Amino acid sequence: MTDRRPIDLLRELIELESPTGHSEGLRGVADRVVAELEPYGGEAAFTGDHLRVDLAGKGEPLLLLGHVDTVWEVGTLAGMPFRVENGRAYGPGAYDMKAGLVVLVEAIREAGKRRRAARVFLTADEETGSLTGRPLIEEAAEGAAAAFVLEPPTQRGNLKTARKGLARYRLVVHGHASHAGTHPDEGASAVEELAHQILALKGLGDPRHGISVNVGVVRGGLRENVVADHAEAWIDVRVTHAADVPKIEAALARLEPKDSGTRLELEGGFTRPPLERSPGSARLFEQAREHGAKLGLDLHESASGGGSDGNLVGALGVPVLDGLGAEGGGAHARDEHVLLDSIPIRASLLARLLIEPGL
Ligand SMILES: [Zn+2]
């Protein structure tokens, strides 16, 4: 890549460490993007650390969604500094999604005055489920003709028109403690009860219909010679179809203890509804494929098991095209990186969509 500007901006954004909740870093990244968009008439407004920038233009606005937070704690940079090696740029948040922010900025620059009206929304708590960003994202989606999401593409650079919905639950089992040797009958084991519940939870999964239930964390008990009075499980639930959301919720609400001496307590719920492929998103993809072909990209459409803010917008009926960020790999891992050559190409792809979205 001969043009230094995107690399320099990427470096700056990566070196502003911005884990969810770290206001100083989140603001630093957002302010940097605001400065880049200013020459294009961007009007910026912050709510907390969430940023919305309205860019005047023709037609119903196109929503550009990204996030400024990363999963990397402050101080990560010291052991995982920004570096370029073999055309790859490494560093915390490089792929998810600081390079996506660079693609966004470069696309707006490239599209110039020919683009449609646009609305940029950068969430500050995407990595923890956009709990505070959600109402603002939904507001930003009002009246939008389409949403383009700057999350990373698949490993092969493909775009995403569908994503699973995601719920997180914590199941707490309250039992009754007793001496395991002298008075086992007086106790009710929360650990044993949880074992039954884990199998029941597993039974709610239905891979053929895109429903998965994963008990990822279990904790419980005090010592081996005590009947456990407490145990808990942290559960990840994913569904492909919106119609399955109430079914799963109802099934979880129906869980009952096998041992009547124990009691169950369930907290949590869906943080993101499923993003189902819609006729609108299919049209956006088709348009992107045509634009991509002119740029030498052979784009394919795919579905993702992970959620994004695109899920929130899709649920409102706005056509969503996701995975428009830079190519790379290692999201949330130590070898997180982006392919530098992909940044200008993906920016050109998005610029073309901003001019001619196909809707
Ligand atoms: Zn992301």
Image (cartoon, rainbow, N blue to C red):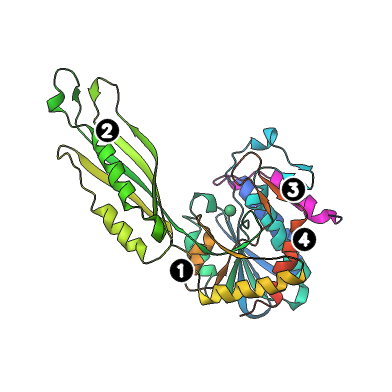
Mark earlier in primary sequence (1, 3): 3
Quarter of the image for residue 120 reads bottom right
Crowding around mark 1 (Cα neighbors within 10 Å: few <14, some 14 to 19, many 20+) is: some
The mark closer to the camera, 3 or 2, is 2
Q: Which one is in front, 267 or 350?
A: 350
Residue 236 in the image: state x and y as whole percent: 41, 48
Q: Which mark is residue 315?
A: 1
The mark closer to the camera, 4 or 3, is 4
Q: Looking at this rendering, what residue extends furthest in the top direction?
A: 182
* Residue where numbered disc 3 is placed: 12
Discs 2, 1 touching: Cβ within 8 Å: no
The mark closer to the camera, 2 or 1, is 2
* Residue where numbered disc 4 is placed: 344
Residue 270 in the image: state x and y as whole percent: 39, 56
Distance from disc 2 to disc 1, alpha carbons, whole Å, reads: 38 Å
Discs 4, 3 touching: Cβ within 8 Å: no
Give the magenta range.
3-23
* Residue where numbered disc 2 is placed: 191
Q: Which mark is residue 48?
A: none
Whether 5 is among the magenta residues is yes
What residue sits 48% from the left and 56% below the top?
A: 132
User: In the image, what residue type sits under mark 3?
Assistant: Glu
Mark earlier in primary sequence (2, 1): 2
Crowding around mark 4 (Cα neighbors within 10 Å: few <14, some 14 to 19, many 20+) is: some
What residue sits 54% from the left and 76% below the top?
A: 280
User: In the image, what residue type sits under mark 1?
Assistant: Ala
Mark 4, secondary structure of its residue: helix
Mark 3, secondary structure of its residue: helix
- The answer to whether residue 355 is above or below residue 275 is below
